[in-house]
Image: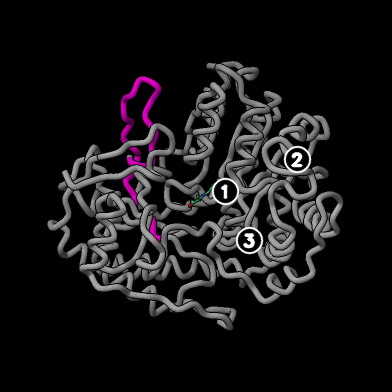
């Protein structure tokens, strides 16, 4: 048996509670069957997200103690700016309070009524910001990206021919920018290849288009490039990162994920574009030398970015996820393959083939798993989609239960516990029924909507 090995030791711990099943049933009912609305005190393993809940290293904690606090011109900010420049090689940086704030700034600056933004796949907040500014998202993931059972190493790749077709259809001047998402979140944390990014760059060059990389899940993507792409095998993580960055005009990220810290930011190659976006930072985020981040967060991020260049560090998440996926497959539980980054993704269309998509099967299984285990996962399916402007409800391409693997947080025995509970749930899946909204918010409904059994 192949068992992943942690290249770190645990020196600070936090006590967990596993409340009785009756209490869990009460808690999820009170939460409107929405795992976002559970209280952490009622949760045993929190696998909701990898956002802002990764374990920091001793070096990160130490750096936080020497943070230089000032509104303008702090040495802490300069350290962060220099580190980003060293890693990505872009001259300009704008700090933000988190990833979606970067999306707000990019969309307000570049998207106008009738704009089109082609991307390998959307992320919830990305799409919301683009549509809010009058733009339209064109999802052009390659067909293999939507195959739930696959051995393809780079399911996050964009279909290059479809990008050409979109440019021909709308005209290059309608394209606000082309967006590539590393570690494609909503299709199961699937990576993009360096070859694909190179091909997309070629199309962008031919039509004078901006190429924007969402690097929130870059760490996992770097691991997969090193493991799976022939041309990367002999390169260091730092070299692979620079090769990716050199192909892009803008790189933005959520530092809640990348760098195991908090905050976010936008790295920009062109001075003109930097100046165009700059004014929005003091308006929405904070002054240019903190952008809504505390100096402690910035210190932790600077060190975290450096640690992301260490293969031992970025291996832990994907290796634990691969272990979980393998174990579930041994017991016949339907999962997304190959194992990606971010977390283990259960293929709910196969798991709950008796519940129609309109009854939110991925939401139902998230609620059921919490009841049987105290484990909190996240719905990533139709519930996470937004209604079209005319009110119709698009069905998601995939119905996923995401069990995120925050970096360096869980032990292998805890992972085995989740596997055991999922296997039990699969064997008793007929107990699970569908859900319907009792309260449906208009924007990002999955965050705080409430549901009840059909
Ligand atoms: N882009 C990607 C690919 C993300 O995964 C996220 C966040 C964001 C942008 C937005 O960043 O949360 O800092 O504002 N993903 C979290 C998740 C919410 O749980 O998958 P943020």
Residue range in magenta is 383-403
Query: How far apart are the two marked residues, 1 and 3, measured between alpha carbons?
Result: 18 Å
The image quadrant that residue 425 belongs to is bottom left
- Taking the magenta stretch, the answer to whether it contains residue 397 is yes
Q: Position of residue 190 (x, y in %)?
A: 48, 51
Q: Position of residue 244 (x, y in %)?
A: 68, 48
Q: Is residue 334 above or below residue 118?
A: below
Q: Is mark 1 within 8 Å of ligand 1?
A: yes
Q: For the N terminus, which image quadrant?
A: bottom left
Q: Which mark is residue 231?
A: none
Q: Which residue is mark 1?
A: 182
Q: Is residue 45 above or below residue 189?
A: below
Query: How far apart are the two marked residues, 1 and 2, measured between alpha carbons?
Result: 17 Å
- Of circles 1 and 3, which is in front? 3
Asked if residue 307 lies left or right of residue 38, the reply is right
Q: Which residue is mark 2?
A: 268
Mark closest to the chain's N terminus, 3 or 2: 3
Q: Is residue 280 above or below residue 304?
A: above
């Amino acid at each position: 048996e192949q068992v992943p090995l942690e290249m770190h030791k645990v020196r600070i711990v936090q006590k967990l509670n596993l409340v009785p099943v009756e209490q869990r049933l009460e808690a999820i009912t009170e939460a409107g069957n929405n795992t976002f609305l559970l209280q952490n005190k009622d949760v045993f393993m929190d696998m909701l997200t990898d956002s802002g809940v990764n374990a920091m290293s001793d070096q990160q904690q130490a750096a936080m103690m020497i943070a230089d606090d000032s509104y303008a011109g702090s040495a802490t900010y300069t350290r962060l700016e220099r580190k980003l420049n060293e890693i990505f090689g872009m001259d300009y940086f704008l700090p933000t309070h988190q990833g979606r704030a970067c999306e707000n700034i990019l969309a307000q600056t570049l998207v106008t009524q009738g704009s089109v933004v082609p991307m390998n796949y959307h992320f919830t907040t990305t799409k919301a910001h683009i549509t809010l500014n009058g733009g339209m998202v064109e999802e052009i993931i390659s067909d293999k990206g939507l195959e739930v059972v696959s051995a393809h190493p780079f399911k996050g790749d964009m279909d290059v021919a479809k990008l050409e077709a979109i440019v021909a259809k709308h005209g290059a001047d309608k394209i606000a920018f082309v967006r590539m998402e590393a570690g494609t979140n909503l299709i199961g944390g699937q990576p993009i290849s360096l070859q694909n990014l190179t091909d997309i760059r070629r199309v962008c060059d031919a039509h004078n288009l901006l190429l924007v990389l969402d690097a929130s899940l870059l760490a996992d993507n770097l691991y997969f490039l090193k493991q799976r792409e022939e041309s990367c095998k002999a390169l260091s993580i730092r070299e692979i990162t620079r090769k990716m960055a050199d192909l892009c005009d803008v790189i933005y990220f959520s530092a809640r994920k990348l760098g195991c810290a908090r905050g976010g930011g936008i790295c920009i190659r062109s001075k003109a574009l930097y100046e165009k976006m700059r004014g929005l930072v003091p308006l929405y985020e904070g002054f240019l030398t903190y952008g809504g981040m505390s100096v402690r967060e910035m210190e932790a991020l600077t060190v975290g970015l450096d640690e992301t260049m260490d293969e031992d560090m970025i291996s832990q998440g994907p290796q634990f996820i691969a272990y979980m996926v393998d174990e579930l497959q041994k017991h016949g539980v339907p999962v997304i393959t190959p194992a990606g980054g971010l977390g283990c993704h259960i293929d709910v269309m196969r798991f709950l083939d008796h519940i129609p998509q309109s009854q939110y099967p991925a939401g139902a299984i998230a609620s059921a798993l919490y009841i049987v285990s105290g484990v909190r996962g996240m719905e990533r399916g139709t519930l996470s989609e937004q209604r079209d402007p005319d009110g119709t409800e698009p069905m998601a391409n995939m119905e996923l239960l995401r069990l995120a693997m925050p970096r360096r947080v869980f032990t292998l025995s805890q992972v085995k516990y989740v596997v055991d509970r999922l296997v039990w749930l699969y064997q008793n899946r007929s107990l699970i029924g569908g859900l319907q909204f009792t309260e449906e918010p208009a924007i990002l409904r999955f965050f705080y909507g409430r549901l009840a059994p059909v």
